[in-house]
Each structure stands twice: as C-alpha cells, then as structure tokens.
Image (tube, grey):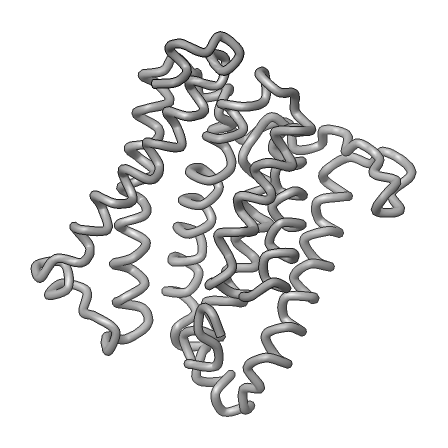
Amino acid sequence: MVTLFWQALRPLRNFILLLLAIFGFEMVVGRLTGSALWQGWFGGADAPFTTSMLGAQLGRLIVSLLMIGVLLLLGYRRTDFFLTRGQLDAPSAPERWLGISKSEPWTKFGGQFALYISLGTLLFLILGGRPTPAALAGALPLLPAVLLLAAMNAFNEELTYRASLLAGLEHIIGPQQALWLTAVFFGLGHYFGVPYGVIGVLLASFLGWMMGKAMLETRGFFWAWLIHFLQDVLIFSFMAIGSITPGG
C-alpha cells in the first residue's frame, strides 16, 4: 500500500507483490499439505522419505505454478523470468574477487563449477553424516526417486526464489544489486536446511549468487537448475538413508 503513495517505492511494486505472493501461496499451500487428507496420502514425519518428500515437492510445485500465473498476470514474458533454456554457451563475466580473471563460456565454466561445488557438498555430507558403506549401498535402490525429487526441488526453488525475484528487481535496481539481494534471500532460507546454521547460510548465499549469475548471463534456466539439481541429488541421497536431516 505504501507504494501507492510513496513515489520512490513505486518501481518496486511488482517485486513487493511477488514477495507477498510467495509468502501467501506458501501459507495457503502449507495448510493444504498439513491437512488430514494430504497427510493421509503422503504421511507425516514417520512416512518413508520418498513418500513424505513427494508430498512436500508437490506442494512446492503448486506454489511454483501459481507464481508463474502471477508473473504472467503482471505482464512478464517467460524470457523475463528466465523460463527458457537460455544461451548455454554465453560468456561468463570475470569475477576478480573469486580469482576468475577471464571470461569463459558457460559450457566450460558451468561444468567446472558444478563439479567443484558438488565435490564440496559431498565432502560436507560425508563429514557431517558419517554414513557407513552399507548405508550408502542402501541408497542405490532409492536413486530413481531421488533423481525425480531433486529435479522437482531444483525447479521449484529456482523458479520461486530466484527467477521470479530477479524478474521483479533486475530492471529496477540493476542486475548486480538484484543478484546479491536474491542470493542473501536464498541463503537465509537455508538456516534450517542442508547445509544448516550460519555456515549453511553463507554457503547457500554463495551458491545462490552463482546460480543467479548463471540466469542473468545466459538469460535462461538451464545452468542454474542443473547446478541446483546436482546438489539436491547428493543431499536427498543422504537424507533418504537418514544420515542427515534439515537443520542438523
């Protein structure tokens, strides 16, 4: 309502509406997924990982689809909120604070970053979960379900918490400011996630910054989704065997 009267904030009206939509839809869908009917379908805390996680991801998918509807109603095109593959070999901008002094195509830079960050995630999971070889072997039969759930989660989080917010901010405050704001927003959301705590916030913020950079530079969804998907495959595999839980 303030944006109706405060001239300086009017350009942020769509961004504020998108934030309200996210929290509003999550509240409504949260009541749905917490209902006796939904719990009867997907179980509660005692349900198997694949069943309970499928229920959670279907709820998040409802939020994602509703957010796409809101974006379209606000006049955004699919390309405006990055719901396209994008230019996979677009050049990545140098980042001297990361020691990256030259531009490389995302087909090279994205693949290398995905590998390095996945190895870091795997090391964190092994040190934090300390699974036995038998437990790791027990995750193999669950791999098809883990791949599906990781793909859904990566899509839902990238669409809701990154693409839609970047669309609402990029042309108002500039791509770099939008990138940092959405990265911190994503990081704070992982305080009770995996990784968790202050370290989890810092790691998730950095990862969010990199995936936002991928969206802005390629003008598409692919690299951000792929990097996110690989992390979720590892995390969900360790969650499926009970080696780690969100929030520690």
Q: Percent x, y for residue 44?
A: 21, 70
> For this view, does 88 lie left or right of residue 102?
left
Q: Percent x, y for residue 51?
A: 26, 67
Q: Nearer the viewer, residue 1 or 198?
A: 1
Tell me where residue 246 sits by quadrant. Answer: bottom left
Q: Nearer the viewer, residue 194 or 242?
A: 194
Tell me where residue 142 sits by quadrant. Answer: bottom left
> For this view, does 27 lie left or right of residue 12?
left
Q: Residue furthest left?
A: 37
Please give the count of numbered marks on the rendered protein. 0
> For this view, does 194 lie left or right of residue 160?
right
Residue visible at 57% across and 16% down? 172
Q: Percent x, y for residue 207?
A: 64, 50
Residue visible at 27% across and 39% down? 25
- The relative height of residue 186 versus residue 243 in the rendered view (above or below) is above
Quadrant occupied by the N terminus: top left
Q: Percent x, y for residue 37?
A: 8, 59
Residue visible at 59% across and 44% down? 184
Q: Residue furthest right?
A: 101
- The relative height of residue 9 versus residue 175 in the rendered view (above or below) is above
Residue visible at 37% across and 24% down? 17
